[in-house]
Each structure stands twice: as structure tokens, then as C-alpha cells.
Amino acid sequence: MLKEAVISPTPRHCLTTRLWHWINALCLLVLLMSGLTIFNAHPRLYWGEYGANNDPAWLAVGSSERTGYLRLGEMRIETTGFLGNWKDSEGRTRTWAFPGWATIPSNYSLADGRRWHFFFAWIFALGLTLFMIRSLWNRHIQKDLRMREQEWRPSHIWHSLRDHTRISAIRKSSGEPYNVIQKLTYIGVIFILLPLMIATGLTMSPAMDANWPFLTDLFGGRQSARSVHFLTAFLLVVFFLIHIVMVLLSRPVRQIRAMITGGHARESGQ
């Protein structure tokens, strides 16, 4: 016979998880905005070891006298007013790839953008390392993210994916243990995307390239590592936006409070 779910005194989110969550959120925001400043210095992406203005780029943001555009392969999309050609707060036309409101600093300064990027990159890398060590130590990964045998079934994954399209199911899941879609997403972000960001970032560093040349070989060249770096950043932005939408749909005040204070886990009896 099923019993009602009871509230456990155990926090839903331990202190290390909460600290890492907010520090990571700040770092990723600064890294994204300062990374766009760095991208503005050469707004093109290539595959291989080399890349210059006359080399074929698989992605480019550019501008003509009056228009801005985004080019993906052979496809060209006009982006006037948003990318490539836009007006600043004083009404002056600018031709940087990304507008000032999306970059750190808001004016174009490659040197300052790199300072911001490298400083927060080290905080980000250190925080991720400590989080992984602590999560293995307090069994957060084993308890909350471990995939159980039945969760690998396609029918189970499909059912969980379908629930993510229903607002009522999203609200009901608030405070519940992670479902299979959440587990797969967090595993992918924590153990694939975030380490990939760090590894490709190191590959683009001339100093690291000189000391660890195997990184360049691993990604097929510095320009390939740069492309993977920006693609990974794009996937993290998509994850962040979906994460925000899910929080807003599933009792946001309770969710945010739990990530600040820890909240409480639910337990189900039988």
C-alpha cells in the first residue's frame, strides 16, 4: 500500500552544489560576454589549423556599408540591427559582430576582453574540479545522477521527454528526484560540455599549445578547437535558456529558494 510522500530533513541541494551553481552561473555569463568580445576581433570560424580572412570559413559575421549578415556555409542571413551592423546607444552605426550590450567590456577592447575571460576561466575551471571531487566524496553524483537500469529503456525516456512538454507535469516534478531527461542533461553538461570548454580553451592558448601539443592534435588544429569552443558555448546557452524556462514553469520561488537555502528532499514510502 502506498503511503503519502513525506518531507525529508535532508537538503535537496547540498551547500557545495548551491555554491557551485551560483559561482558557475556568474562565471559562464562573464565568459560568454567576454568571449564575444574576443570573437569580435575575428568574427569567423574555421576547421583545421589555420584561418585568415581569405580562407573559407564555415561561419562568419560581417557587414557591408549598410547591412549586417550571418553566413553559415553558403547560406547568408541578413542581421542588420542585431549582428554585424547595428547602432549604439548614441545612434552611431557600429560594425562589430556582436553589439556592445552583449559584450564585456561594452566598448571594443580585445585586451580587456581577454583579461576578463582568462580571470573567470580559471575560477570556472577550479570550481568545476572542486565540485566534481566533492560530488564524488558526498555521493551526490551516485545518489542524484546515477542512471538506473529501467531508466535506459526507450519507453521510459520517451515518457519523461513527453512530460517535459506538459506544464502540469513540469509543475508536479518540482522538488521530486531528477528524472531521466534531467539526469542525461546534467551528465552531458557537467561531464561533457563543461570539460570540453576548458580543454578547447587550453588548446587555443599559445603557452598551453607549446607545452601540451597533443591538445592541438586531439582537436585537429587550433581553429577546429576554436570552432568546437564556440559550438559548445552555444549549446550551454541553449541549456541555460531551457533551464530558466523550466524553473519559471515549475514554482520558481520555491526552486530559487531551494537553490539558495538547500530546500528539502521528498521521500516516498510504500
Image (cartoon, rainbow, N blue to C red):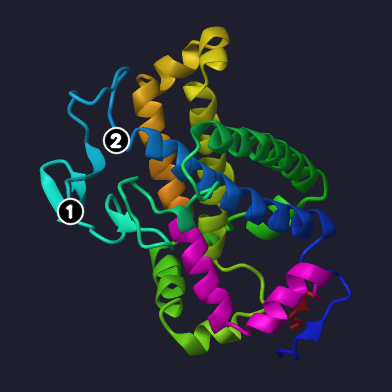
Where is residue 32 shown, x and y percent of the image? 51, 48
Q: Please identify the quarter of the rendering in which residue 149 is found.
A: bottom right
**Residue 208 shows in the view:** yes
In the image, what residue occupies the spot 23% across and 59% down? 80
Which element is circle 1 on?
A: loop
Task: Say the numbered circle drawn on residue 66.
Answer: 1
Upstream in the sequence, badge 1 or badge 2?
A: 2
Q: Main secondary structure of the magenta part?
A: helix
Would you place residue 259 above or below residue 234 in this image?
below
Magenta residues span 237-263
Of circles 1 and 2, which is in front? 1
The residue under label 2 is 44
Q: Quadrant of the C terminus?
A: bottom right
Measure how far apart labels 1 and 2 are at the Cα level: 20 Å
Where is residue 6 shown, x and y percent of the image? 80, 85
Q: Nearer the viewer, residue 209 or 174?
A: 209
Pointer 1 with pointer 2, Cβ within 8 A? no
Q: Nearer the viewer, residue 20 or 178?
A: 20
- Does residue 3 appear to the left or right of 111 in the view shown? right
**How dense is the environment of label 1, judged by Cα within 10 Å: few (below 14), some, or many (20 and up)?**
few
